[in-house]
């Protein structure tokens, strides 16, 4: 997983997008635009560099493959709109619930009802709130048996019905 960071004027970083395996990162270069975000690997990643010249050749010589790349650009735009709508509006409890739902879908290998949570600070950076607010909300979810810790690490099971109810508040 790779997180894209945007730095606010006060110096605080905000996570504005997460990328899973097989994602293209840095597609702004297709239009000659500078990179506006910092990419940080959250876990081990395999990366390949594709030059701007190679992308331009692909556009001319392999339009079907280039169209696939543009489809991913469009998917990034849709995802950005979704992040604004789901993670930047409403109270803290529904926003944390929606983020947990997102993370459970994002992790393709995870079983239904299982989620690998990010750190409290990373979740706060996505939601634009304090780590303390996220921590209190997660503690409430645990007490309410919405989240149940599984072993060590950040793996939890969740009650999807209860979580969906909170997410829609």
Image (cartoon, helix red, strand yellow):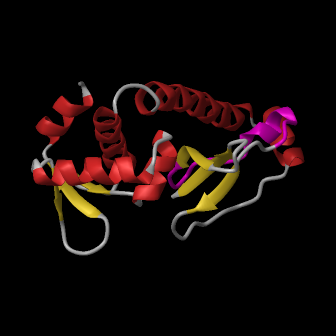
49 left or right of 2 in image: right
Q: Which of 35 and 52 is in front in this view?
A: 35
Above or below — where is 143 with respect to 154?
above
Q: Which residue is drawn at 14% across and 47% down?
A: 146
Q: Residue at x 32, y 36 (%)?
A: 98
Q: Of helix, strand and loop, which mostly describes the magenta segment?
A: loop
Q: Residue at x 53, y 64 (%)?
A: 42
Above or below — where is 120 with respect to 54?
below
* Residue 38 visible in rendering: yes
Tell whether position 26 is magenta.
yes
Q: What stretch is highlighted in magenta?
A: 19-34
Image quadrant holding the C terminus, namely top left
74 left or right of 164 in image: right
Judged from this view, the residue extending furthest toward the bottom is 152
151 left or right of 11 in image: left
Q: How many labels does the image show?
A: 0
Q: Which of 109 and 40 is in front in this view?
A: 40
Q: In the rendering, at what x and y percent does residue 26 appear?
A: 72, 46
Above or below — where is 17 with respect to 156?
above
Q: In the rendering, at what x and y percent does residue 30 appear?
A: 81, 37
Q: In the rendering, at what x and y percent does residue 156 appear?
A: 22, 59
* Residue 112 visible in rendering: no
120 left or right of 156 in image: right
Q: Which residue is drawn at 50% across and 40% down?
A: 128
Q: In the rendering, at what x and y percent does residue 148 appear?
A: 15, 58
Tell whether position 10 is magenta.
no
Instruction: Tell me which corner region of the image, top left, top right, bottom left or bottom right, holds residue 86.
Output: top left
């Amino acid at each position: 997983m790779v997180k894209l960071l945007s730095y606010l004027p006060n110096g605080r970083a905000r996570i504005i997008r997460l990328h899973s395996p097989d994602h293209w990162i840095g597609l702004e270069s297709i239009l000659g635009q500078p990179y506006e975000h910092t990419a940080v690997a959250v876990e081990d990643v395999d990366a390949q560099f594709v030059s701007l010249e190679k992308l331009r050749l692909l556009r001319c010589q392999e339009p079907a493959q280039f169209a696939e790349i543009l489809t991913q650009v469009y998917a990034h735009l849709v995802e950005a709109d979704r992040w604004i709508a789901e993670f930047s509006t409403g109270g803290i409890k529904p926003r944390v619930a929606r983020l947990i739902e997102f993370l459970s879908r994002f992790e393709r290998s995870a079983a239904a009802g299982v989620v690998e949570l990010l750190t409290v600070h990373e979740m706060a950076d996505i939601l634009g709130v304090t780590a303390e607010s996220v921590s209190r909300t997660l503690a409430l979810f645990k007490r309410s048996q919405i989240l149940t810790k599984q072993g060590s690490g950040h793996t939890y099971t969740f009650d999807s019905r209860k979580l969906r109810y909170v997410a829609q508040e």
